[in-house]
Image (spheres, rainbow, N blue to C red):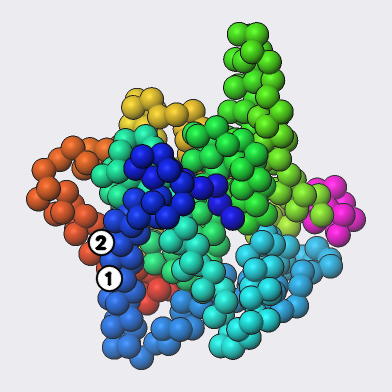
Amino acid sequence: MLPPPRGARGTPGRSALRHASPALLAYAAVRLLGVLVFAVWARREHRDVWHLLAESWDCDWYLKIADEGYAHTLGTQIDANNLAFFPLHPLLIRAGSVIAPEPRGAVGLAVAVACSFLAAWGIFAVGDHLYGRRAGVLLAALWGSLPVALVQWMGYTESLFTALTAWALYAVLTGRWIWAGALAALAGLTRPTGVALAAAVSLTALLTLWRRGRDGRGFPVRVVVGALLAPLGWLSYVAWVGFRLGRWDGYFAVQKLWRNEWDGGVGTLRTVLDLLSVERPQLFLMMVTATLLGSLALFVLSAADRQPLPLLLFTGLLLLIVLGSKGVYFPRARFLLPAFPLLLPLAAALARARTHVTVTVLLAAALTSAAFGGHMLLAWNGPP
């Protein structure tokens, strides 16, 4: 259960869902367009739509973990140890498979699609809380129109992680610290980058406690509990992997076999410079590069706009992790899908713009997303 959002007049429950319905409908529209374009394109190329959305690449890793569990040893093979994948999504697949064992991948895909709507609702709630209903609707629509947004409706973890992130950040903004800590802990069981959300929640809570102590207002238990809960999911899984492999750095050893090590961004910079020096770089890699550079620009705008601290902490730490890794380059646009607060400056600007300008921008974004989604799974020779 997620923390109940507030409706237009601050009332929880059904009124909040009605209040968010334009955002959910806008999100559904842009994603249905993307899936329709992808399905038509795939059929023309005689490709299996179901396999690509529910069973390919990382989807298959999660399905195998749900079926067979985790590895017991580290090994030496590159890109082969499934302990690199966090457990919440496979656990949900395993639980759901009792209800729907066939077809393979159905539960993973259903979890992703359902969580994408929960994410869109949470994203709307954050935008509505900060800038009003129109900005919240546009924020959800923009998130559904990102270049790699097709992943949101694949059997991947991005939708689940974004849903937990959005509602955790909303909980912080509205002072619901125990909810924030619990949701951040679940996010830490979903993706490695859950550590960014945990840090954002805990640091904001600690700053709140420091300010209250300075003003002589005491230390609310709920803030302390939220701060302590937030990192437990990520820390628990990292500790469990270390225990399973019999070495304290077991998780980091696994990540090293996947070539995911932090080098401060040196590897990322080299890759970008190499791509820019090539006469005809691959389109997908150029899209990833544009996404990374655009995300940096949006972070600067977000900071200049004085976004609330938990949002800036989360997006800043996520960018630091994604850009600072020397691991594989091509999935980094996908890794930034949960960084929806970066879109707030665009959503706020579009909310102030004339209707025809807003509609034109959204339509262009949705069509571009649909085109890149098809290219990502059908033309790019690799995982998203």
Q: Magenta region, mostly helix, strand or loop?
A: helix
User: Could you tell whether 272 is left or right of 97 in the image?
Assistant: left
**Is disc 2 in contact with disc 1, using a CB cutoff of under 8 Å?**
yes
User: Could you tell whether 154 is left or right of 300 in the image?
Assistant: right
In the displayed structure, would residue 160 be above or below residue 205?
A: below
Q: Which mark is residue 366?
A: 2
Q: How many marks?
A: 2
Q: Which residue is mark 1?
A: 33
Q: Identify the residue at horizontal 34%, vertical 42% (top origin).
A: 8
The answer to which of 336 and 24 lies nearer the viewer is 24
The answer to which of 76 and 318 lies nearer the viewer is 318
Quarter of the image for residue 7 reads top left
In the displayed structure, would residue 192 be above or below residue 319?
A: below
Crowd around label 1: few <14 · some 14–19 · many ≥20 (10 Å):
some
The kind of residue tagged 2 is Ala
- In the image, residue 302 lies at what x, y percent? 37, 32
